[in-house]
Amino acid sequence: MEFATPLVPARLIKRYKRFLADVRLEDGREVTAHCANPGSMLGLAEPGMKVWLEPNDDPRKKLKFGWRLVEHDNGHFTGVDTSVPNRALKAALMAHEVSGLPPYDLVRPEVKYGENSRIDFLLSGDGPDTYVEVKSVTLSRQSGLAEFPDSVTARGAKHVAELAQMVKQGHRAVMFYLVQRTDCAAVTLAGDIDPAYKAAFDHAADAGVIVLAHACRIDPTGITLGDPIPFRP
């Protein structure tokens, strides 16, 4: 998935109200960028960090920049836009490039299921339908290890519980963790941050929900699905 317009570098001044970030461009201008991330962004929103913004000239948008990446001092990148994993995964699904998933002929995004929920992707083909829930992973507190979630997520716990129900009804269900960091080679759960999510996940795994994890290839030109990586429960 390539960015629609070339990204421009900036320095973070502050992130606030979850969806807003004040930044300083290289020419010295200070602007406000949209931050498409409702999580805590633990470790990713420190003042002075180098960030990459996507400009836009859409007259319908009040903010003319969207915050897309953090560039770390070691040269690695983290993608902070939580809508990117679904777009990157959709492209890979359409091209049948996702290992670990059964054969399928039809990819349907945002299908209603459960109780007032929408599954990220419903795959249909040989055998039962496959329900795929995608989570963007950006937290890392230990070198090389990504963690989910970065804050309490009652919505996330509800989703894994509903996947368990799909399995009980005879369908396949997949929890797909997409690590938007280039410095991590494995992913696990942050049970200390959200014990309720961890408990819901454990129940779903026991019920037969499949867990897949993939890395991302990230640079200022775009983000694409990377290789499978280990999930460490």
Image (cartoon, grey):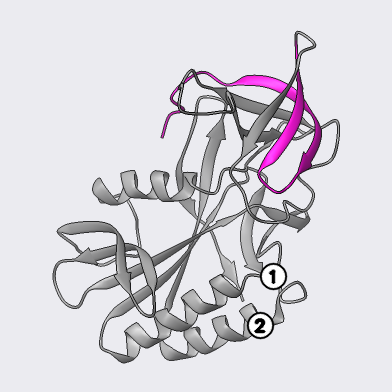
Q: Quadrant of residue 40?
A: bottom right
State the image coordinates of residue 35 (x, y, percent, origin top left).
63, 40
Q: Residue at x 62, y 26 (%)?
A: 53
Residue beneath disc 2:
196
Check disc 2: other Cα within 10 Å, few if <14, some if 14-19, many if 20+. some
Pick whichever, 47 or 137, lies toward us. 47
Determine whether, in the image, residue 73 is placed left or right of residue 100: right
Assign a secondary structure to mark 2.
Answer: helix
Quadrant assignment for the N terminus: top left
Assign a secondary structure to mark 1.
Answer: loop
Pick whichever, 53 or 15, lies toward us. 15
Q: Which residues are magenta?
A: 1-26
Residue beneath disc 1:
152
Q: Mark 1 and mark 2 in contact? Answer it, CB < 8 Å.
A: yes
Identified by mark 1, the residue type is Val
Q: Quadrant of residue 108?
A: bottom left
